[in-house]
Image (cartoon, rainbow, N blue to C red):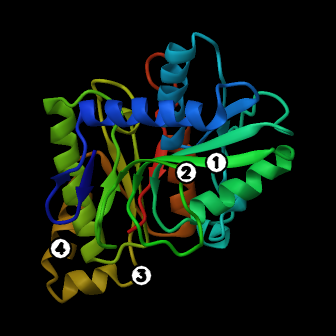
């Protein structure tokens, strides 16, 4: 797990993430006095991976099964009007009635609090829990809403310009190479004030050895003007897109093109049938 700005800054390694998961699992069990009437719900996308890890750890400790669900918050986001006419809506899976249960919402990074606010609204549509708690791997600060986590793997001071990226999976040379490539794309996208940016591929799943990382960049209206006045970042990005080097970076020039790319990549799957995942990066 790392913070990305101009230079990657490792925050937690694989062992550090596992230690945080073990500690959070024990804290959840202690606070709730076991797993009776307890349910984990992971917020798509990366909160699902963390919820799965917590579920396995809790079951290892308790020797009993604990319910775990998946929550898609797309329709509850306060920036839904900015997403477009065809937002990607993925499946929500809540394993049973949540009324009267203690529900632990799980996400990877707590930032402004807006994702959690949307998750709360989405969750109560399925019932009236006795309590809702929040578990996150990283709290990076910069809250815009009065939301606080009950269980935190690590508090990380960050600037708003930094991107915190959580990777569940073994750290390999291939993953490091793809991370370096993605970081450079993000630097160019920020420099030209790209409207939106998303990544897709086995890089964003929990696959131990990722095969690829694809990205789509929605270019700003004045992108060609930036090229004409000699912006080095705009020129480099234009060259990459025109020559198709690398061939995993794709441009969108309009809302319609952006939505078509999202729809296309949302249907891609790993060889074992799992969705590869689409993750939008807020620039």
Compared to residue 80, the image places residue 54 above or below, namely above
Residue nearest the viewer, comparing 235 with 97: 97
At which x and y percent is residue 197? 41, 61
Q: Are marks 3 and 4 in contact (CB under 8 Å)?
A: no
- Image quadrant containing the C terminus: bottom left
Q: Are marks 2 and 3 in contact (CB under 8 Å)?
A: no
Q: Which residue is mark 1?
A: 133
SS label for mark 4: helix
* N-terminal label among 2 and 4: 2
In the rendered structure, find residue 221 and report the number of the disc placed on it. Answer: 3
Q: Judge by depth and name the residue closer to the eye, 115 or 173.
A: 115
At horizontal 50% and vertical 14% (from top left) the residue drawn is 60
In three-dimensional space, the C-alpha distance between marks 2 and 4, rounded to whole angstroms, equals 42 Å
Indicate which label's residue lies in the foreground, 3 or 1.
1
Q: Mark 3: few, some, or many residues within 10 Å (few <14, many ≥20)?
A: few
Left or right: 137 with respect to 127?
A: left
- List x then y, in percent, for residue 209: 27, 24
User: Comparing marks 1 and 4, which lies closer to the viewer?
Assistant: 1
- Residue 150, numbered circle: 2
CB contact under 8 Å: marks 2 and 1: yes
Which SS class for mark 2? loop
- When the figure is inspected, residue 253 is found, relative to residue 20, above or below; the finding is below
Check whether the beta carbons of the residues at disc 3 and disc 1 lie within 8 A of each other: no
Q: Earlier in the sequence, mark 3 or mark 4?
A: 3
């Amino acid at each position: 797990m790392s913070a990305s700005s101009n230079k990657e800054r490792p925050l937690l390694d694989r062992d550090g993430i596992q230690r945080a998961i073990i500690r959070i699992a024990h804290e959840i069990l202690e606070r709730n006095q076991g797993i009776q009437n307890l349910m984990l719900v992971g917020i798509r996308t990366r909160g699902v991976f963390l919820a799965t890890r917590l579920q396995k750890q809790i079951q290892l400790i308790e020797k009993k099964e604990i319910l775990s669900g998946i929550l898609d918050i797309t329709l509850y986001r306060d920036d839904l009007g900015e997403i477009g006419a065809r937002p990607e809506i993925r499946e929500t899976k809540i394993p049973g009635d949540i009324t009267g249960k203690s529900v632990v919402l799980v996400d990877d990074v707590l930032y402004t609090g807006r994702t959690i606010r949307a998750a709360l609204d989405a969750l109560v549509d399925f019932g009236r829990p006795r309590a809702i708690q929040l578990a996150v791997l990283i709290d990076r600060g910069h809250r815009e809403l009065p939301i606080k986590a009950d269980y935190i793997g690590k508090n990380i001071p960050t600037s708003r310009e930094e991107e915190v990226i959580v990777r569940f999976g073994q750290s390999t040379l291939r993953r490091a190479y793809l991370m370096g490539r993605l970081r450079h794309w993000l630097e160019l996208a920020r420099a030209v004030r790209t409207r939106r940016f998303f990544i897709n591929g086995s890089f964003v799943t929990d696959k131990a050895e990722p095969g690829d990382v694809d990205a789509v960049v929605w270019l700003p209206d004045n992108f060609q003007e930036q090229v004409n006045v000699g912006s080095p970042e705009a020129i480099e990005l234009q060259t990459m897109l025109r020559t198709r080097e690398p061939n995993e970076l794709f441009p969108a020039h309009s809302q319609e093109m952006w939505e078509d790319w999202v729809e296309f990549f949302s249907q891609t799957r790993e060889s074992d049938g799992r969705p590869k995942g689409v993750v939008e990066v807020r620039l």
